[in-house]
Image (cartoon, rainbow, N blue to C red):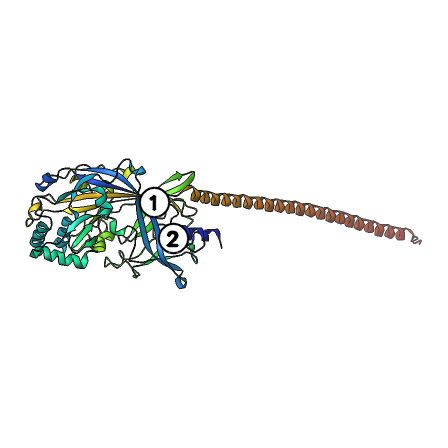
Amino acid sequence: MTKSHNVALMKGLSMGTIWSKFPFSIGFQLYIFNVTNPDGISEGEKPIINELGPYYYDEIQEKTNQLDHEEDDTVSYTIKNTYYFNAENSNGLTGEEEVMVPNYFAFSLINIVAREKPNVLPIIGKALDSIFNKPSNFFIKAKVKDIFFDGLPIDCTVMDLAGKAIRSELKKKNEKFGLKKIAENKYILSMFGPANGTESKARTRVHRGIKNIMDVGKVIEYNNNRNISVWDDEYCDTFNGTDGTVFHPHFDRKGRDDVVVFNPNLCRSISCHFESKTTFDGLEVLRYTTDLGTDGNNNPLHKCYCPATNGCLKKGAFDIYNRTLKPIIVTNPHFYLADEYYSNQVDGLNPDKKNHMIIIDIDPFTGTPLYTRTRVQLNMFINRINNINQIKNIPDVLLPILWIDEIIILPDFLIKKIKFAYMLLKIGRIFQYFLMSIDLGLCGFSGYKYCLLTILRNKVKATEWKNSELLNITKKKMKMNISTLQSSSTLPTID
């Protein structure tokens, strides 16, 4: 098996083992936005927010329930991610801090109903009044750890008609809404709790790269579908790229090829373009970056990502409702690379390339990502609706909720393997040049011997030619002498 096949996803090979379960933890940093003027927003003020974080978690990433498919050289699997709070790297933050945030359940419900059944919004308003005891606004104070993982309480034991309608829907769709049932008609809502330590229901299927190493990691199936099956469009529903954890070897060192990744959370393929050449731990790497948003108004290829009901969002925002049934809008952190329209709606943001860009640093020889920063911000629209008292005066704003910075830094013991591969490559090249020099030396010696032999042959031929000429001259002289002698012996005739 060739060296390049060592990056194939084959049991027993180092890459297959690492790809199955990273032998190191991934950094998972969370930043949350605290709303400082909730009452003012309810009266029409521009939201003012400040960022709190990072809250650092160690993420263990596994590909479970793996099944090899020999017929087409693929492997299918489920995903399991587990998160552990790391107090040391959280710089004194504990998760006990209280922040003011939008009532995610209330705004989610309003957004969903506004999309699908806007005529029942008045009933939703009454139901929310009942569930939350007629709040003055839809902002709540909560502990950060509850927002992230532990969960905010949702009590649906109310008995009025509107509350019962919500209760009935939640019984059927609580998992789709991201709720965890803790008792009859009681739930908790958190951003990442339901996925923590839980295997994904959808299976992903990728090429192993044993037959063709350049196909390694390419996604060909997700959730038993051979296309994405979300956007009702051939371009947007086509699988492109790898699962994002492995890439083919032998990258173009000039960065002329894009890096394409299929993201199951967004249900779309994302193209990362070459940014620059840089170094990581002494190795020259290729840096790629991307924009998570879309631009359906100016890019025809992004039109298929625009929801039929709301149309295209402005540049830099991506609506994932079709995928998750949650009214979440994805952007780069602090609306970096997005239309200024969004950042102008909120005070407290500071978009910055260094802190908010997505980074993928790839070793071009092995195709290994040595350093990555996957940064994504989750946002939610808050909209004025006349039929609901708490939000009849609020501004229409895309409000940032939190952002994630997922960090993968290849550990030293794996970097050493890549450097060892380079050393072997260097030794191979030196040996190749050594063999070439020997070959050239042998060719030169052969040429010298050939030239020497040619010269000797020419000398022999010249000598033979001279000897032949001398022999011919001698023969001619001998003939002349014989002729002369014969003529002299003839007596003259005497008359």
Across and down, in percent, residue 168 comes to 13, 59
- The numbered disc on residue 463 is none
Across and down, in percent, residue 173 comes to 18, 58
Residues 90 and 203: in front is: 90
Across and down, in percent, residue 320 comes to 22, 52
Q: Quick one: which residue is furthest to the top in this view?
A: 92
Q: Mark 2 points at which residue?
A: 20
Picture quadrant where residue 63 is located = bottom left
Q: Is mark 1 on a helix, strand or loop?
A: strand
Residues 216 and 444: in front is: 216
CA separation in Å, label 2 and label 1: 14 Å
Report crowding for label 2: few under 14, some 14 to 19, many 20 or more residues within 10 A (C-alpha). Answer: some
Q: Name the residue under label 1.
A: 26
Q: In which quarter of the image is the C terminus?
A: bottom right
Across and down, in percent, residue 165 comes to 11, 57
State yes or no: discs 2 and 1 in contact (Cβ < 8 Å).
no
Q: Which amino acid does label 2 sit on?
A: Ser
Answer whether residue 277 is visible to the viewer in this image: yes
Identify the residue at image location x=41%, y=56%: 209
Residues 310 and 467: in front is: 310
Q: What element carries label 2?
A: helix
Residues 339 and 451: in front is: 339
Identify the residue at image location x=33%, y=50%: 260
Q: Classify 162 as above or below 93.
A: below
Q: Quick one: which residue is furthest to the front in this view?
A: 183
In the figure, is residue 398 to the left or right of 81?
A: left
Q: Which amino acid does label 1 sit on?
A: Ile
Q: How many marks?
A: 2
In the figure, is residue 171 to the left or right of 119?
A: right
